[in-house]
């Protein structure tokens, strides 16, 4: 039998290494069973000093107060100003951004006073919002049958007159908006209106125009009504009407440049239309175009995305 020489020093080193390894394993095992301490968050003890009344009672004459006390409660009802159509009263920001310097589609409630902007800062008399909440006609807002209180109306008026500021207290800057096309009328050469006689007796159908004859077609267009920045309509660089037998295609339309008129109390651009170029029974659609000289694109009405009844209202049938 071969004898194995025992080396005590090497064996001791091996034992010491093994014990050290086992000790390290044990410490690691114990560490894995102990929950790690969460790191210190340096912001845990910050006092932001919000207080108990932060934004809980906003100024009643601010857009935040108007939204909280009036717009969200009285106007943002399902199917109304809930994002279905503008103004959008769902939030403070949507209320402000769809009111201030925003154009209106419906321009009058009494056919006497015309508006083209919902809210003009510093000018409640030319702000259609104020007209809608104070009118004595049936077109007042809110449309649920109950008028706003005198206090609510005064809060809206005060907000407008103090600059219609946003929720941060900033006064809006007036944009250079395109002109608004307010409306038209039509009259024969004896100055008798013919646009009131609608085909089939339906108010939004084309009006009846005499065949092989002619008529006047004046229209009213205004620039923003908020002071010196507005452009006098007499200075518009584009003032024309296009005529087409296709409701949504004006690419080959007949164009008539209009003449400036100054009757009292309004000022108009006017086209003279000759119906002999269209056969009897033809429906002719027309669109009005204006530009104040500061816009890249002409203002157009009706547009392809306008409601269908506007397209048929801005039309005539030759008879």
Image (cartoon, rainbow, N blue to C red):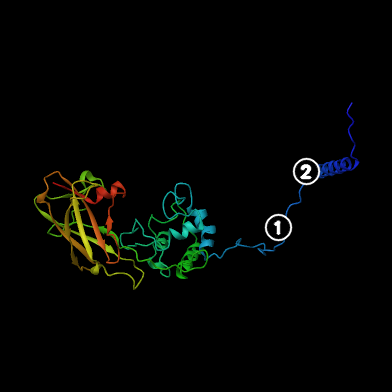
Q: Which residue occupies the foreground of this view, 168 or 2?
A: 2
| Horizontal side of residue 118 vs 18, given as left or right | left
Rendering quarter of residue 12: top right
Point out residue 298 in the picture as x, y percentages from the top left corner. 27, 60
Residue placed under numbered mark 2 in the picture = 32
Mark 1 → mark 2, Cα distance in angstroms = 23 Å
Residue ID for mark 1: 41
Which label's residue is closer to the chain start, 1 or 2?
2
Q: Nearer the viewer, mark 1 or mark 2?
A: 2
**SS label for mark 2:** helix
Find residue 13 and report its horizontal and vertical position in percent: 86, 43
From this viewpoint, which residue is outermost toward the front?
2
Residue that sits furthest to the bottom in the current view: 228
Label 1: state its secondary structure.
loop
> On the picture, is 110 further left or further right than 59?
left
Which quarter of the figure has residue 201? top left
- Looking at this view, is 2 or 318 the one in front? 2
Percent from the top left, x then y, of residue 284? 18, 48
């Amino acid at each position: 039998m071969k004898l194995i020489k025992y080396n005590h020093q090497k064996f001791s080193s091996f034992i010491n290494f093994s014990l050290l390894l086992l000790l390290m394993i044990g410490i690691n095992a114990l560490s894995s069973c102990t929950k790690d301490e969460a790191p210190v968050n340096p912001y845990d003890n910050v006092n932001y000093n919000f207080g108990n009344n932060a934004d809980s009672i906003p100024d009643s004459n601010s857009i935040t107060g108007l939204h909280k006390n009036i717009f969200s409660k009285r106007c943002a009802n399902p199917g109304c100003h809930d994002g279905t159509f503008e103004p959008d009263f769902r939030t403070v920001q949507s209320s402000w951004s769809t009111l201030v310097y925003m154009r209106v589609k419906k321009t009058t409630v009494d056919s006497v006073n015309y508006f083209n902007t919902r809210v003009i800062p510093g000018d409640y008399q030319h702000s259609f919002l104020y007209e809608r909440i104070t009118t004595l006609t049936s077109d007042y807002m809110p449309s649920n049958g109950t008028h706003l209180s005198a206090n609510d109306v005064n809060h809206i008026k005060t907000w407008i007159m103090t600059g219609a500021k946003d929720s941060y207290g900033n006064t809006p800057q007036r944009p250079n908006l395109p002109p608004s096309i307010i409306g038209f009328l039509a009259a024969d050469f004896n100055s008798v209106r013919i646009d009131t006689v609608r085909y089939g007796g339906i108010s939004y159908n084309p009006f009846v125009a005499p065949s092989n004859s002619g008529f006047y077609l004046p229209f009213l267009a205004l620039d923003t009504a908020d002071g010196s920045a507005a452009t006098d309509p007499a200075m518009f660089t584009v003032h024309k009407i296009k005529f087409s037998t296709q409701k949504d295609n004006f690419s080959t339309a007949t164009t008539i440049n209009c003449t400036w008129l100054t009757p009292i109390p309004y000022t108009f651009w006017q086209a003279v239309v000759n119906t002999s170029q269209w056969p009897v029974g033809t429906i002719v659609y027309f669109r009005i175009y204006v530009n104040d000289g500061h816009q890249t694109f002409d203002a157009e009405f009706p547009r392809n995305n306008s409601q269908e009844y506007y397209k048929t209202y801005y039309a005539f049938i030759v008879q």
